[in-house]
Image (cartoon, rainbow, N blue to C red):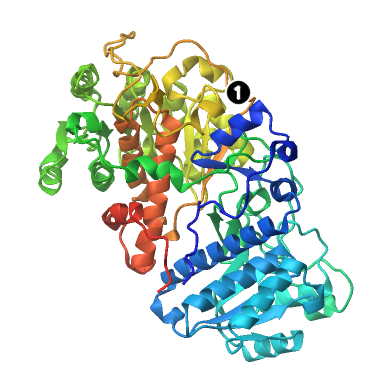
């Protein structure tokens, strides 16, 4: 049995591009090194086509190796996602493959071959949309290989056959859409229009598009950094009478999942027709040398988060560590009206690896919480008449933060404020005072009811905000578009985690005037120094342990509390390398998160990552927690029906997500 490469594994058969071919300058060699990191550039369809043209330099052997890797990666990912529907859909699976004449069709055919090789009861019907003679050499090779390997289990069908199946409403387990890829330019020809419209009318358990759903048109902003809005209206299928002949505007394949192979294309972001987007890393950005990115593409541009950000969580813990060095998370949360949010946030911080977690909650909640979660340090906070957090309790937080950040034996610390605190005026005043006092001292995360526009204006970096779309409208006063996200993050001088089906992270902490408040250890002084930095920093010619901070002395700052050890307070302004902040897209996640409390869990997990590695920039720590949270949601969804779960069950799968086996064929 052939081993199918894991996502992120380089295509071994693709040799490095020579210096003459790639025109590799010193700058490009530096970029090649940087691209071994945890996020990859997002390209427009035109940029992706040019990038691959330079990457393969016309070498058909390289192109064939990449096509095989793409097809097998699609097969693995599709079969993994099918597990979310239960085992019954995989019994005697029936596949329908729509294959175009180019590389996209070849990818789909190879994916079908890989599935049939692993599933002896599977059968496939293949519709070559433009006919056998139209197939380009590599697509023809993929088709010939599929037919020769499984002559009794692969059946070519015609347009008439497809129409008959629509009329009979024949059910398929899986449909692989490989008609058009990212090189598609409208209009669609009549055969493709009819094929896509027909398939959209069939009952299919999982509809999978390779790279982009066939018929998806590039937005009017192609080549820009603005993605279509997430609520863009889907295209409408045309009736058969409108596709009688000629090239016409047509329907779009309605995908449940779209599998972006090699790179994520900007046109697919935020499009409902694409369904859920998966990035299949083929190793294009992990080579020793590679061609320069096409015009308009930049390593300091928008990018997609990869599993590489989780590497520190999958490594051995330092055998000399202790609870004080594994981070101390302070959580100010809860009220009599919303007690559960505080409990979930503290639980998530504990279950995601924090050495110490202190929960400041209304004093009436402490006995119950301490009985349920004895590992946490529970501190009863004076209450308002309505059961919120009262102003008079500030000294409780001050004493403990002074003790934590002043200890030379301690690791990092972070402060999470907001889950379940409510909007009572006295509590909001309390939070405003705390944000002013502790923002310059340690990483501060604001969530839920702590997300108020007036409060954020008084905050200082390092500040992390975690709004969903509704909360973003409240604090930014605008719709949650890419442009508005960049503008607000810059204005707030904060890392903004805009939660949604595709979560977007934007670091505005070092852009514009907000950079004056940004600690040099905790922001992107340049994109190249942080986003693509190695997981283990190098000092004096050797790797530095993740527990060794770049500085060891306590740094005094103005105010009542000393700064965290190894943490540089706000000082000199460091300009961002580019004029506006980038957006990092996280494709990890699952609709199982669409329930109350999932954001409280995320806040606790981010708090832990901020506290565990004080030498690391806040952006990377935040992205790590976000990827872990999303990947765990996927793992939970695979293990049981998403309709029957409750939120805290997510925590039971944190370890499984890190140990996840990429091979899902069984």
The image shows residue 17 at horizontal and vertical percentages of 67, 43
- Asked which quadrant contains residue 662, the reply is bottom left
Tell me if I can see residue 477 in this picture: no
- Asked which quadrant contains residue 355, the reply is top left
Position above or below: 163 against 452: below
Seen at 71% across and 56% down, the residue is: 182
**Side of 655 where 181 appears, left or right:** right
The image shows residue 203 at horizontal and vertical percentages of 58, 81
- Number of marks in the rendered image: 1
Position above or below: 197 against 164: above
Which secondary structure, mark 1? loop
Per the image, the residue denoted by label 1 is: 577
**Side of 94 where 434 appears, left or right:** left
- Asked which quadrant contains residue 247, the reply is bottom right
Tell me if I can see residue 37 in this picture: yes
Please state, as top left, top right, bottom left or bottom right, where the C terminus lies in the image: bottom left
- The answer to which of 72 and 482 lies nearer the viewer is 72
Position above or below: 189 against 631: below
Seen at 18% across and 33% down, the residue is: 323
- The answer to which of 269 and 416 lies nearer the viewer is 269
**Side of 315 where 592 appears, left or right:** right
The image shows residue 92 at horizontal and vertical percentages of 47, 85
- The answer to which of 496 and 383 lies nearer the viewer is 496
- Decide: few, some or many residues near mark 1? Use Cα within 10 Å; few <14, some 14-19, many ≥20: some
Seen at 31% across and 11% down, the residue is: 555
**Side of 319 where 490 appears, left or right:** right
Seen at 43% across and 42% down, the residue is: 309
The image shows residue 207 at horizontal and vertical percentages of 58, 71
């Amino acid at each position: 049995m052939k081993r199918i490469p894991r996502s992120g594994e380089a295509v071994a058969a693709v040799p490095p591009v020579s210096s003459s071919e790639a025109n590799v300058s010193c700058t490009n060699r530096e970029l090649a090194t940087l691209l071994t990191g945890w996020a990859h550039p997002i390209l427009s369809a035109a940029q992706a086509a040019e990038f691959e043209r330079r990457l393969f330099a016309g070498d058909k052997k390289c192109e064939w190796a990449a096509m095989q890797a793409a097809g097998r990666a699609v097969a693995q990912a599709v079969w993994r996602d099918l597990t979310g529907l239960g085992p019954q859909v995989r019994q005697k699976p029936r596949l329908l493959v729509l294959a175009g004449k180019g590389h996209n069709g070849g990818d789909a055919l190879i994916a079908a071959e890989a599935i049939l090789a692993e599933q002896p009861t599977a059968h496939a019907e293949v519709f070559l949309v433009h006919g056998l003679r139209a197939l380009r050499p590599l697509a023809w090779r993929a088709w010939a290989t599929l037919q020769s390997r499984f002559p009794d289990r692969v059946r070519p069908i015609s347009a008439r056959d497809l129409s008959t199946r629509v009329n009979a409403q024949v059910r398929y387990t899986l449909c692989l859409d490989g008609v058009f890829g990212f090189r598609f330019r409208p209009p669609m020809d009549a055969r493709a229009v009819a094929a896509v419209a027909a398939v959209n009318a069939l009952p299919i358990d999982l509809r999978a598009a390779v790279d982009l759903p066939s018929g998806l048109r590039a937005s009017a902003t192609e080549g820009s950094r603005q993605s279509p809005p997430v609520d863009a209206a889907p295209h409408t299928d045309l009736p058969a009478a409108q596709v009688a002949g000629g090239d016409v505007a047509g329907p779009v394949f309605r995908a449940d999942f779209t599998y972006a192979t090699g790179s994520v294309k900007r046109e697919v972001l935020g499009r409902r027709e694409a369904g859920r987007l998966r990035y299949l890393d083929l190793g294009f950005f992990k080579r020793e040398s590679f061609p320069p990115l096409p015009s308009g593409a930049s390593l300091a541009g928008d990018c997609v988060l990869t599993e590489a950000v989780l590497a520190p969580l999958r490594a051995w813990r330092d055998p000399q560590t202790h609870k004080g060095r594994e981070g101390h998370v302070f959580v100010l949360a809860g009220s009599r009206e919303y007690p559960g949010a505080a409990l979930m946030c503290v639980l998530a911080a504990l279950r995601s690896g924090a050495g110490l977690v202190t929960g400041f909650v209304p004093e009436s909640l402490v006995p119950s919480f301490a009985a349920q979660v004895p590992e946490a340090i529970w501190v009863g906070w004076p209450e308002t008449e309505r059961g919120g957090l009262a102003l008079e309790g500030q000294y409780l937080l001050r004493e403990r933060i002074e003790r934590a950040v002043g200890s030379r034996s301690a690791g990092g610390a972070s402060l999470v404020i907001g889950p379940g605190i409510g909007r009572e005026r006295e509590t909001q005043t309390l939070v405003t005072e705390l944000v002013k006092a502790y923002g310059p001292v340690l990483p501060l995360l604001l969530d839920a009811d702590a997300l108020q526009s007036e409060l954020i204006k008084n905050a200082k970096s390092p500040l992390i905000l975690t709004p969903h779309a509704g909360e973003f409208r409240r604090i930014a006063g605008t719709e949650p578009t890419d442009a508005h996200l960049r503008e607000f993050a810059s204005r707030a001088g904060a890392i903004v985690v805009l939660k949604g089906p595709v979560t977007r992270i934007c670091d505005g902490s070092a852009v514009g005037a907000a950079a004056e408040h940004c600690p040099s250890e905790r922001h992107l002084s340049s994109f190249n120094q942080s986003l693509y930095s190695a997981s283990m920093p190098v000092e004096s010619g050797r790797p530095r342990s993740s527990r060794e901070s770049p500085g060891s002395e306590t740094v005094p700052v103005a105010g009542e509390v000393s700064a965290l050890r190894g943490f540089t307070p706000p000082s000199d302004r460091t300009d961002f390398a580019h004029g506006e902040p980038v957006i990092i897209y996280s494709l990890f996640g699952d609709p199982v998160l669409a329930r109350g409390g999932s954001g409280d869990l995320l806040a606790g997990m981010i708090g832990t990552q901020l506290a565990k590695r004080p030498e690391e920039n806040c952006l990377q720590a935040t992205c790590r927690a976000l990827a872990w949270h999303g990947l765990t949601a996927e793992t939970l969804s695979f293990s049981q029906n998403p309709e029957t779960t409750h939120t805290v069950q997510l925590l039971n799968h944190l370890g499984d997500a890190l140990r996840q086996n990429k091979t899902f064929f069984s």
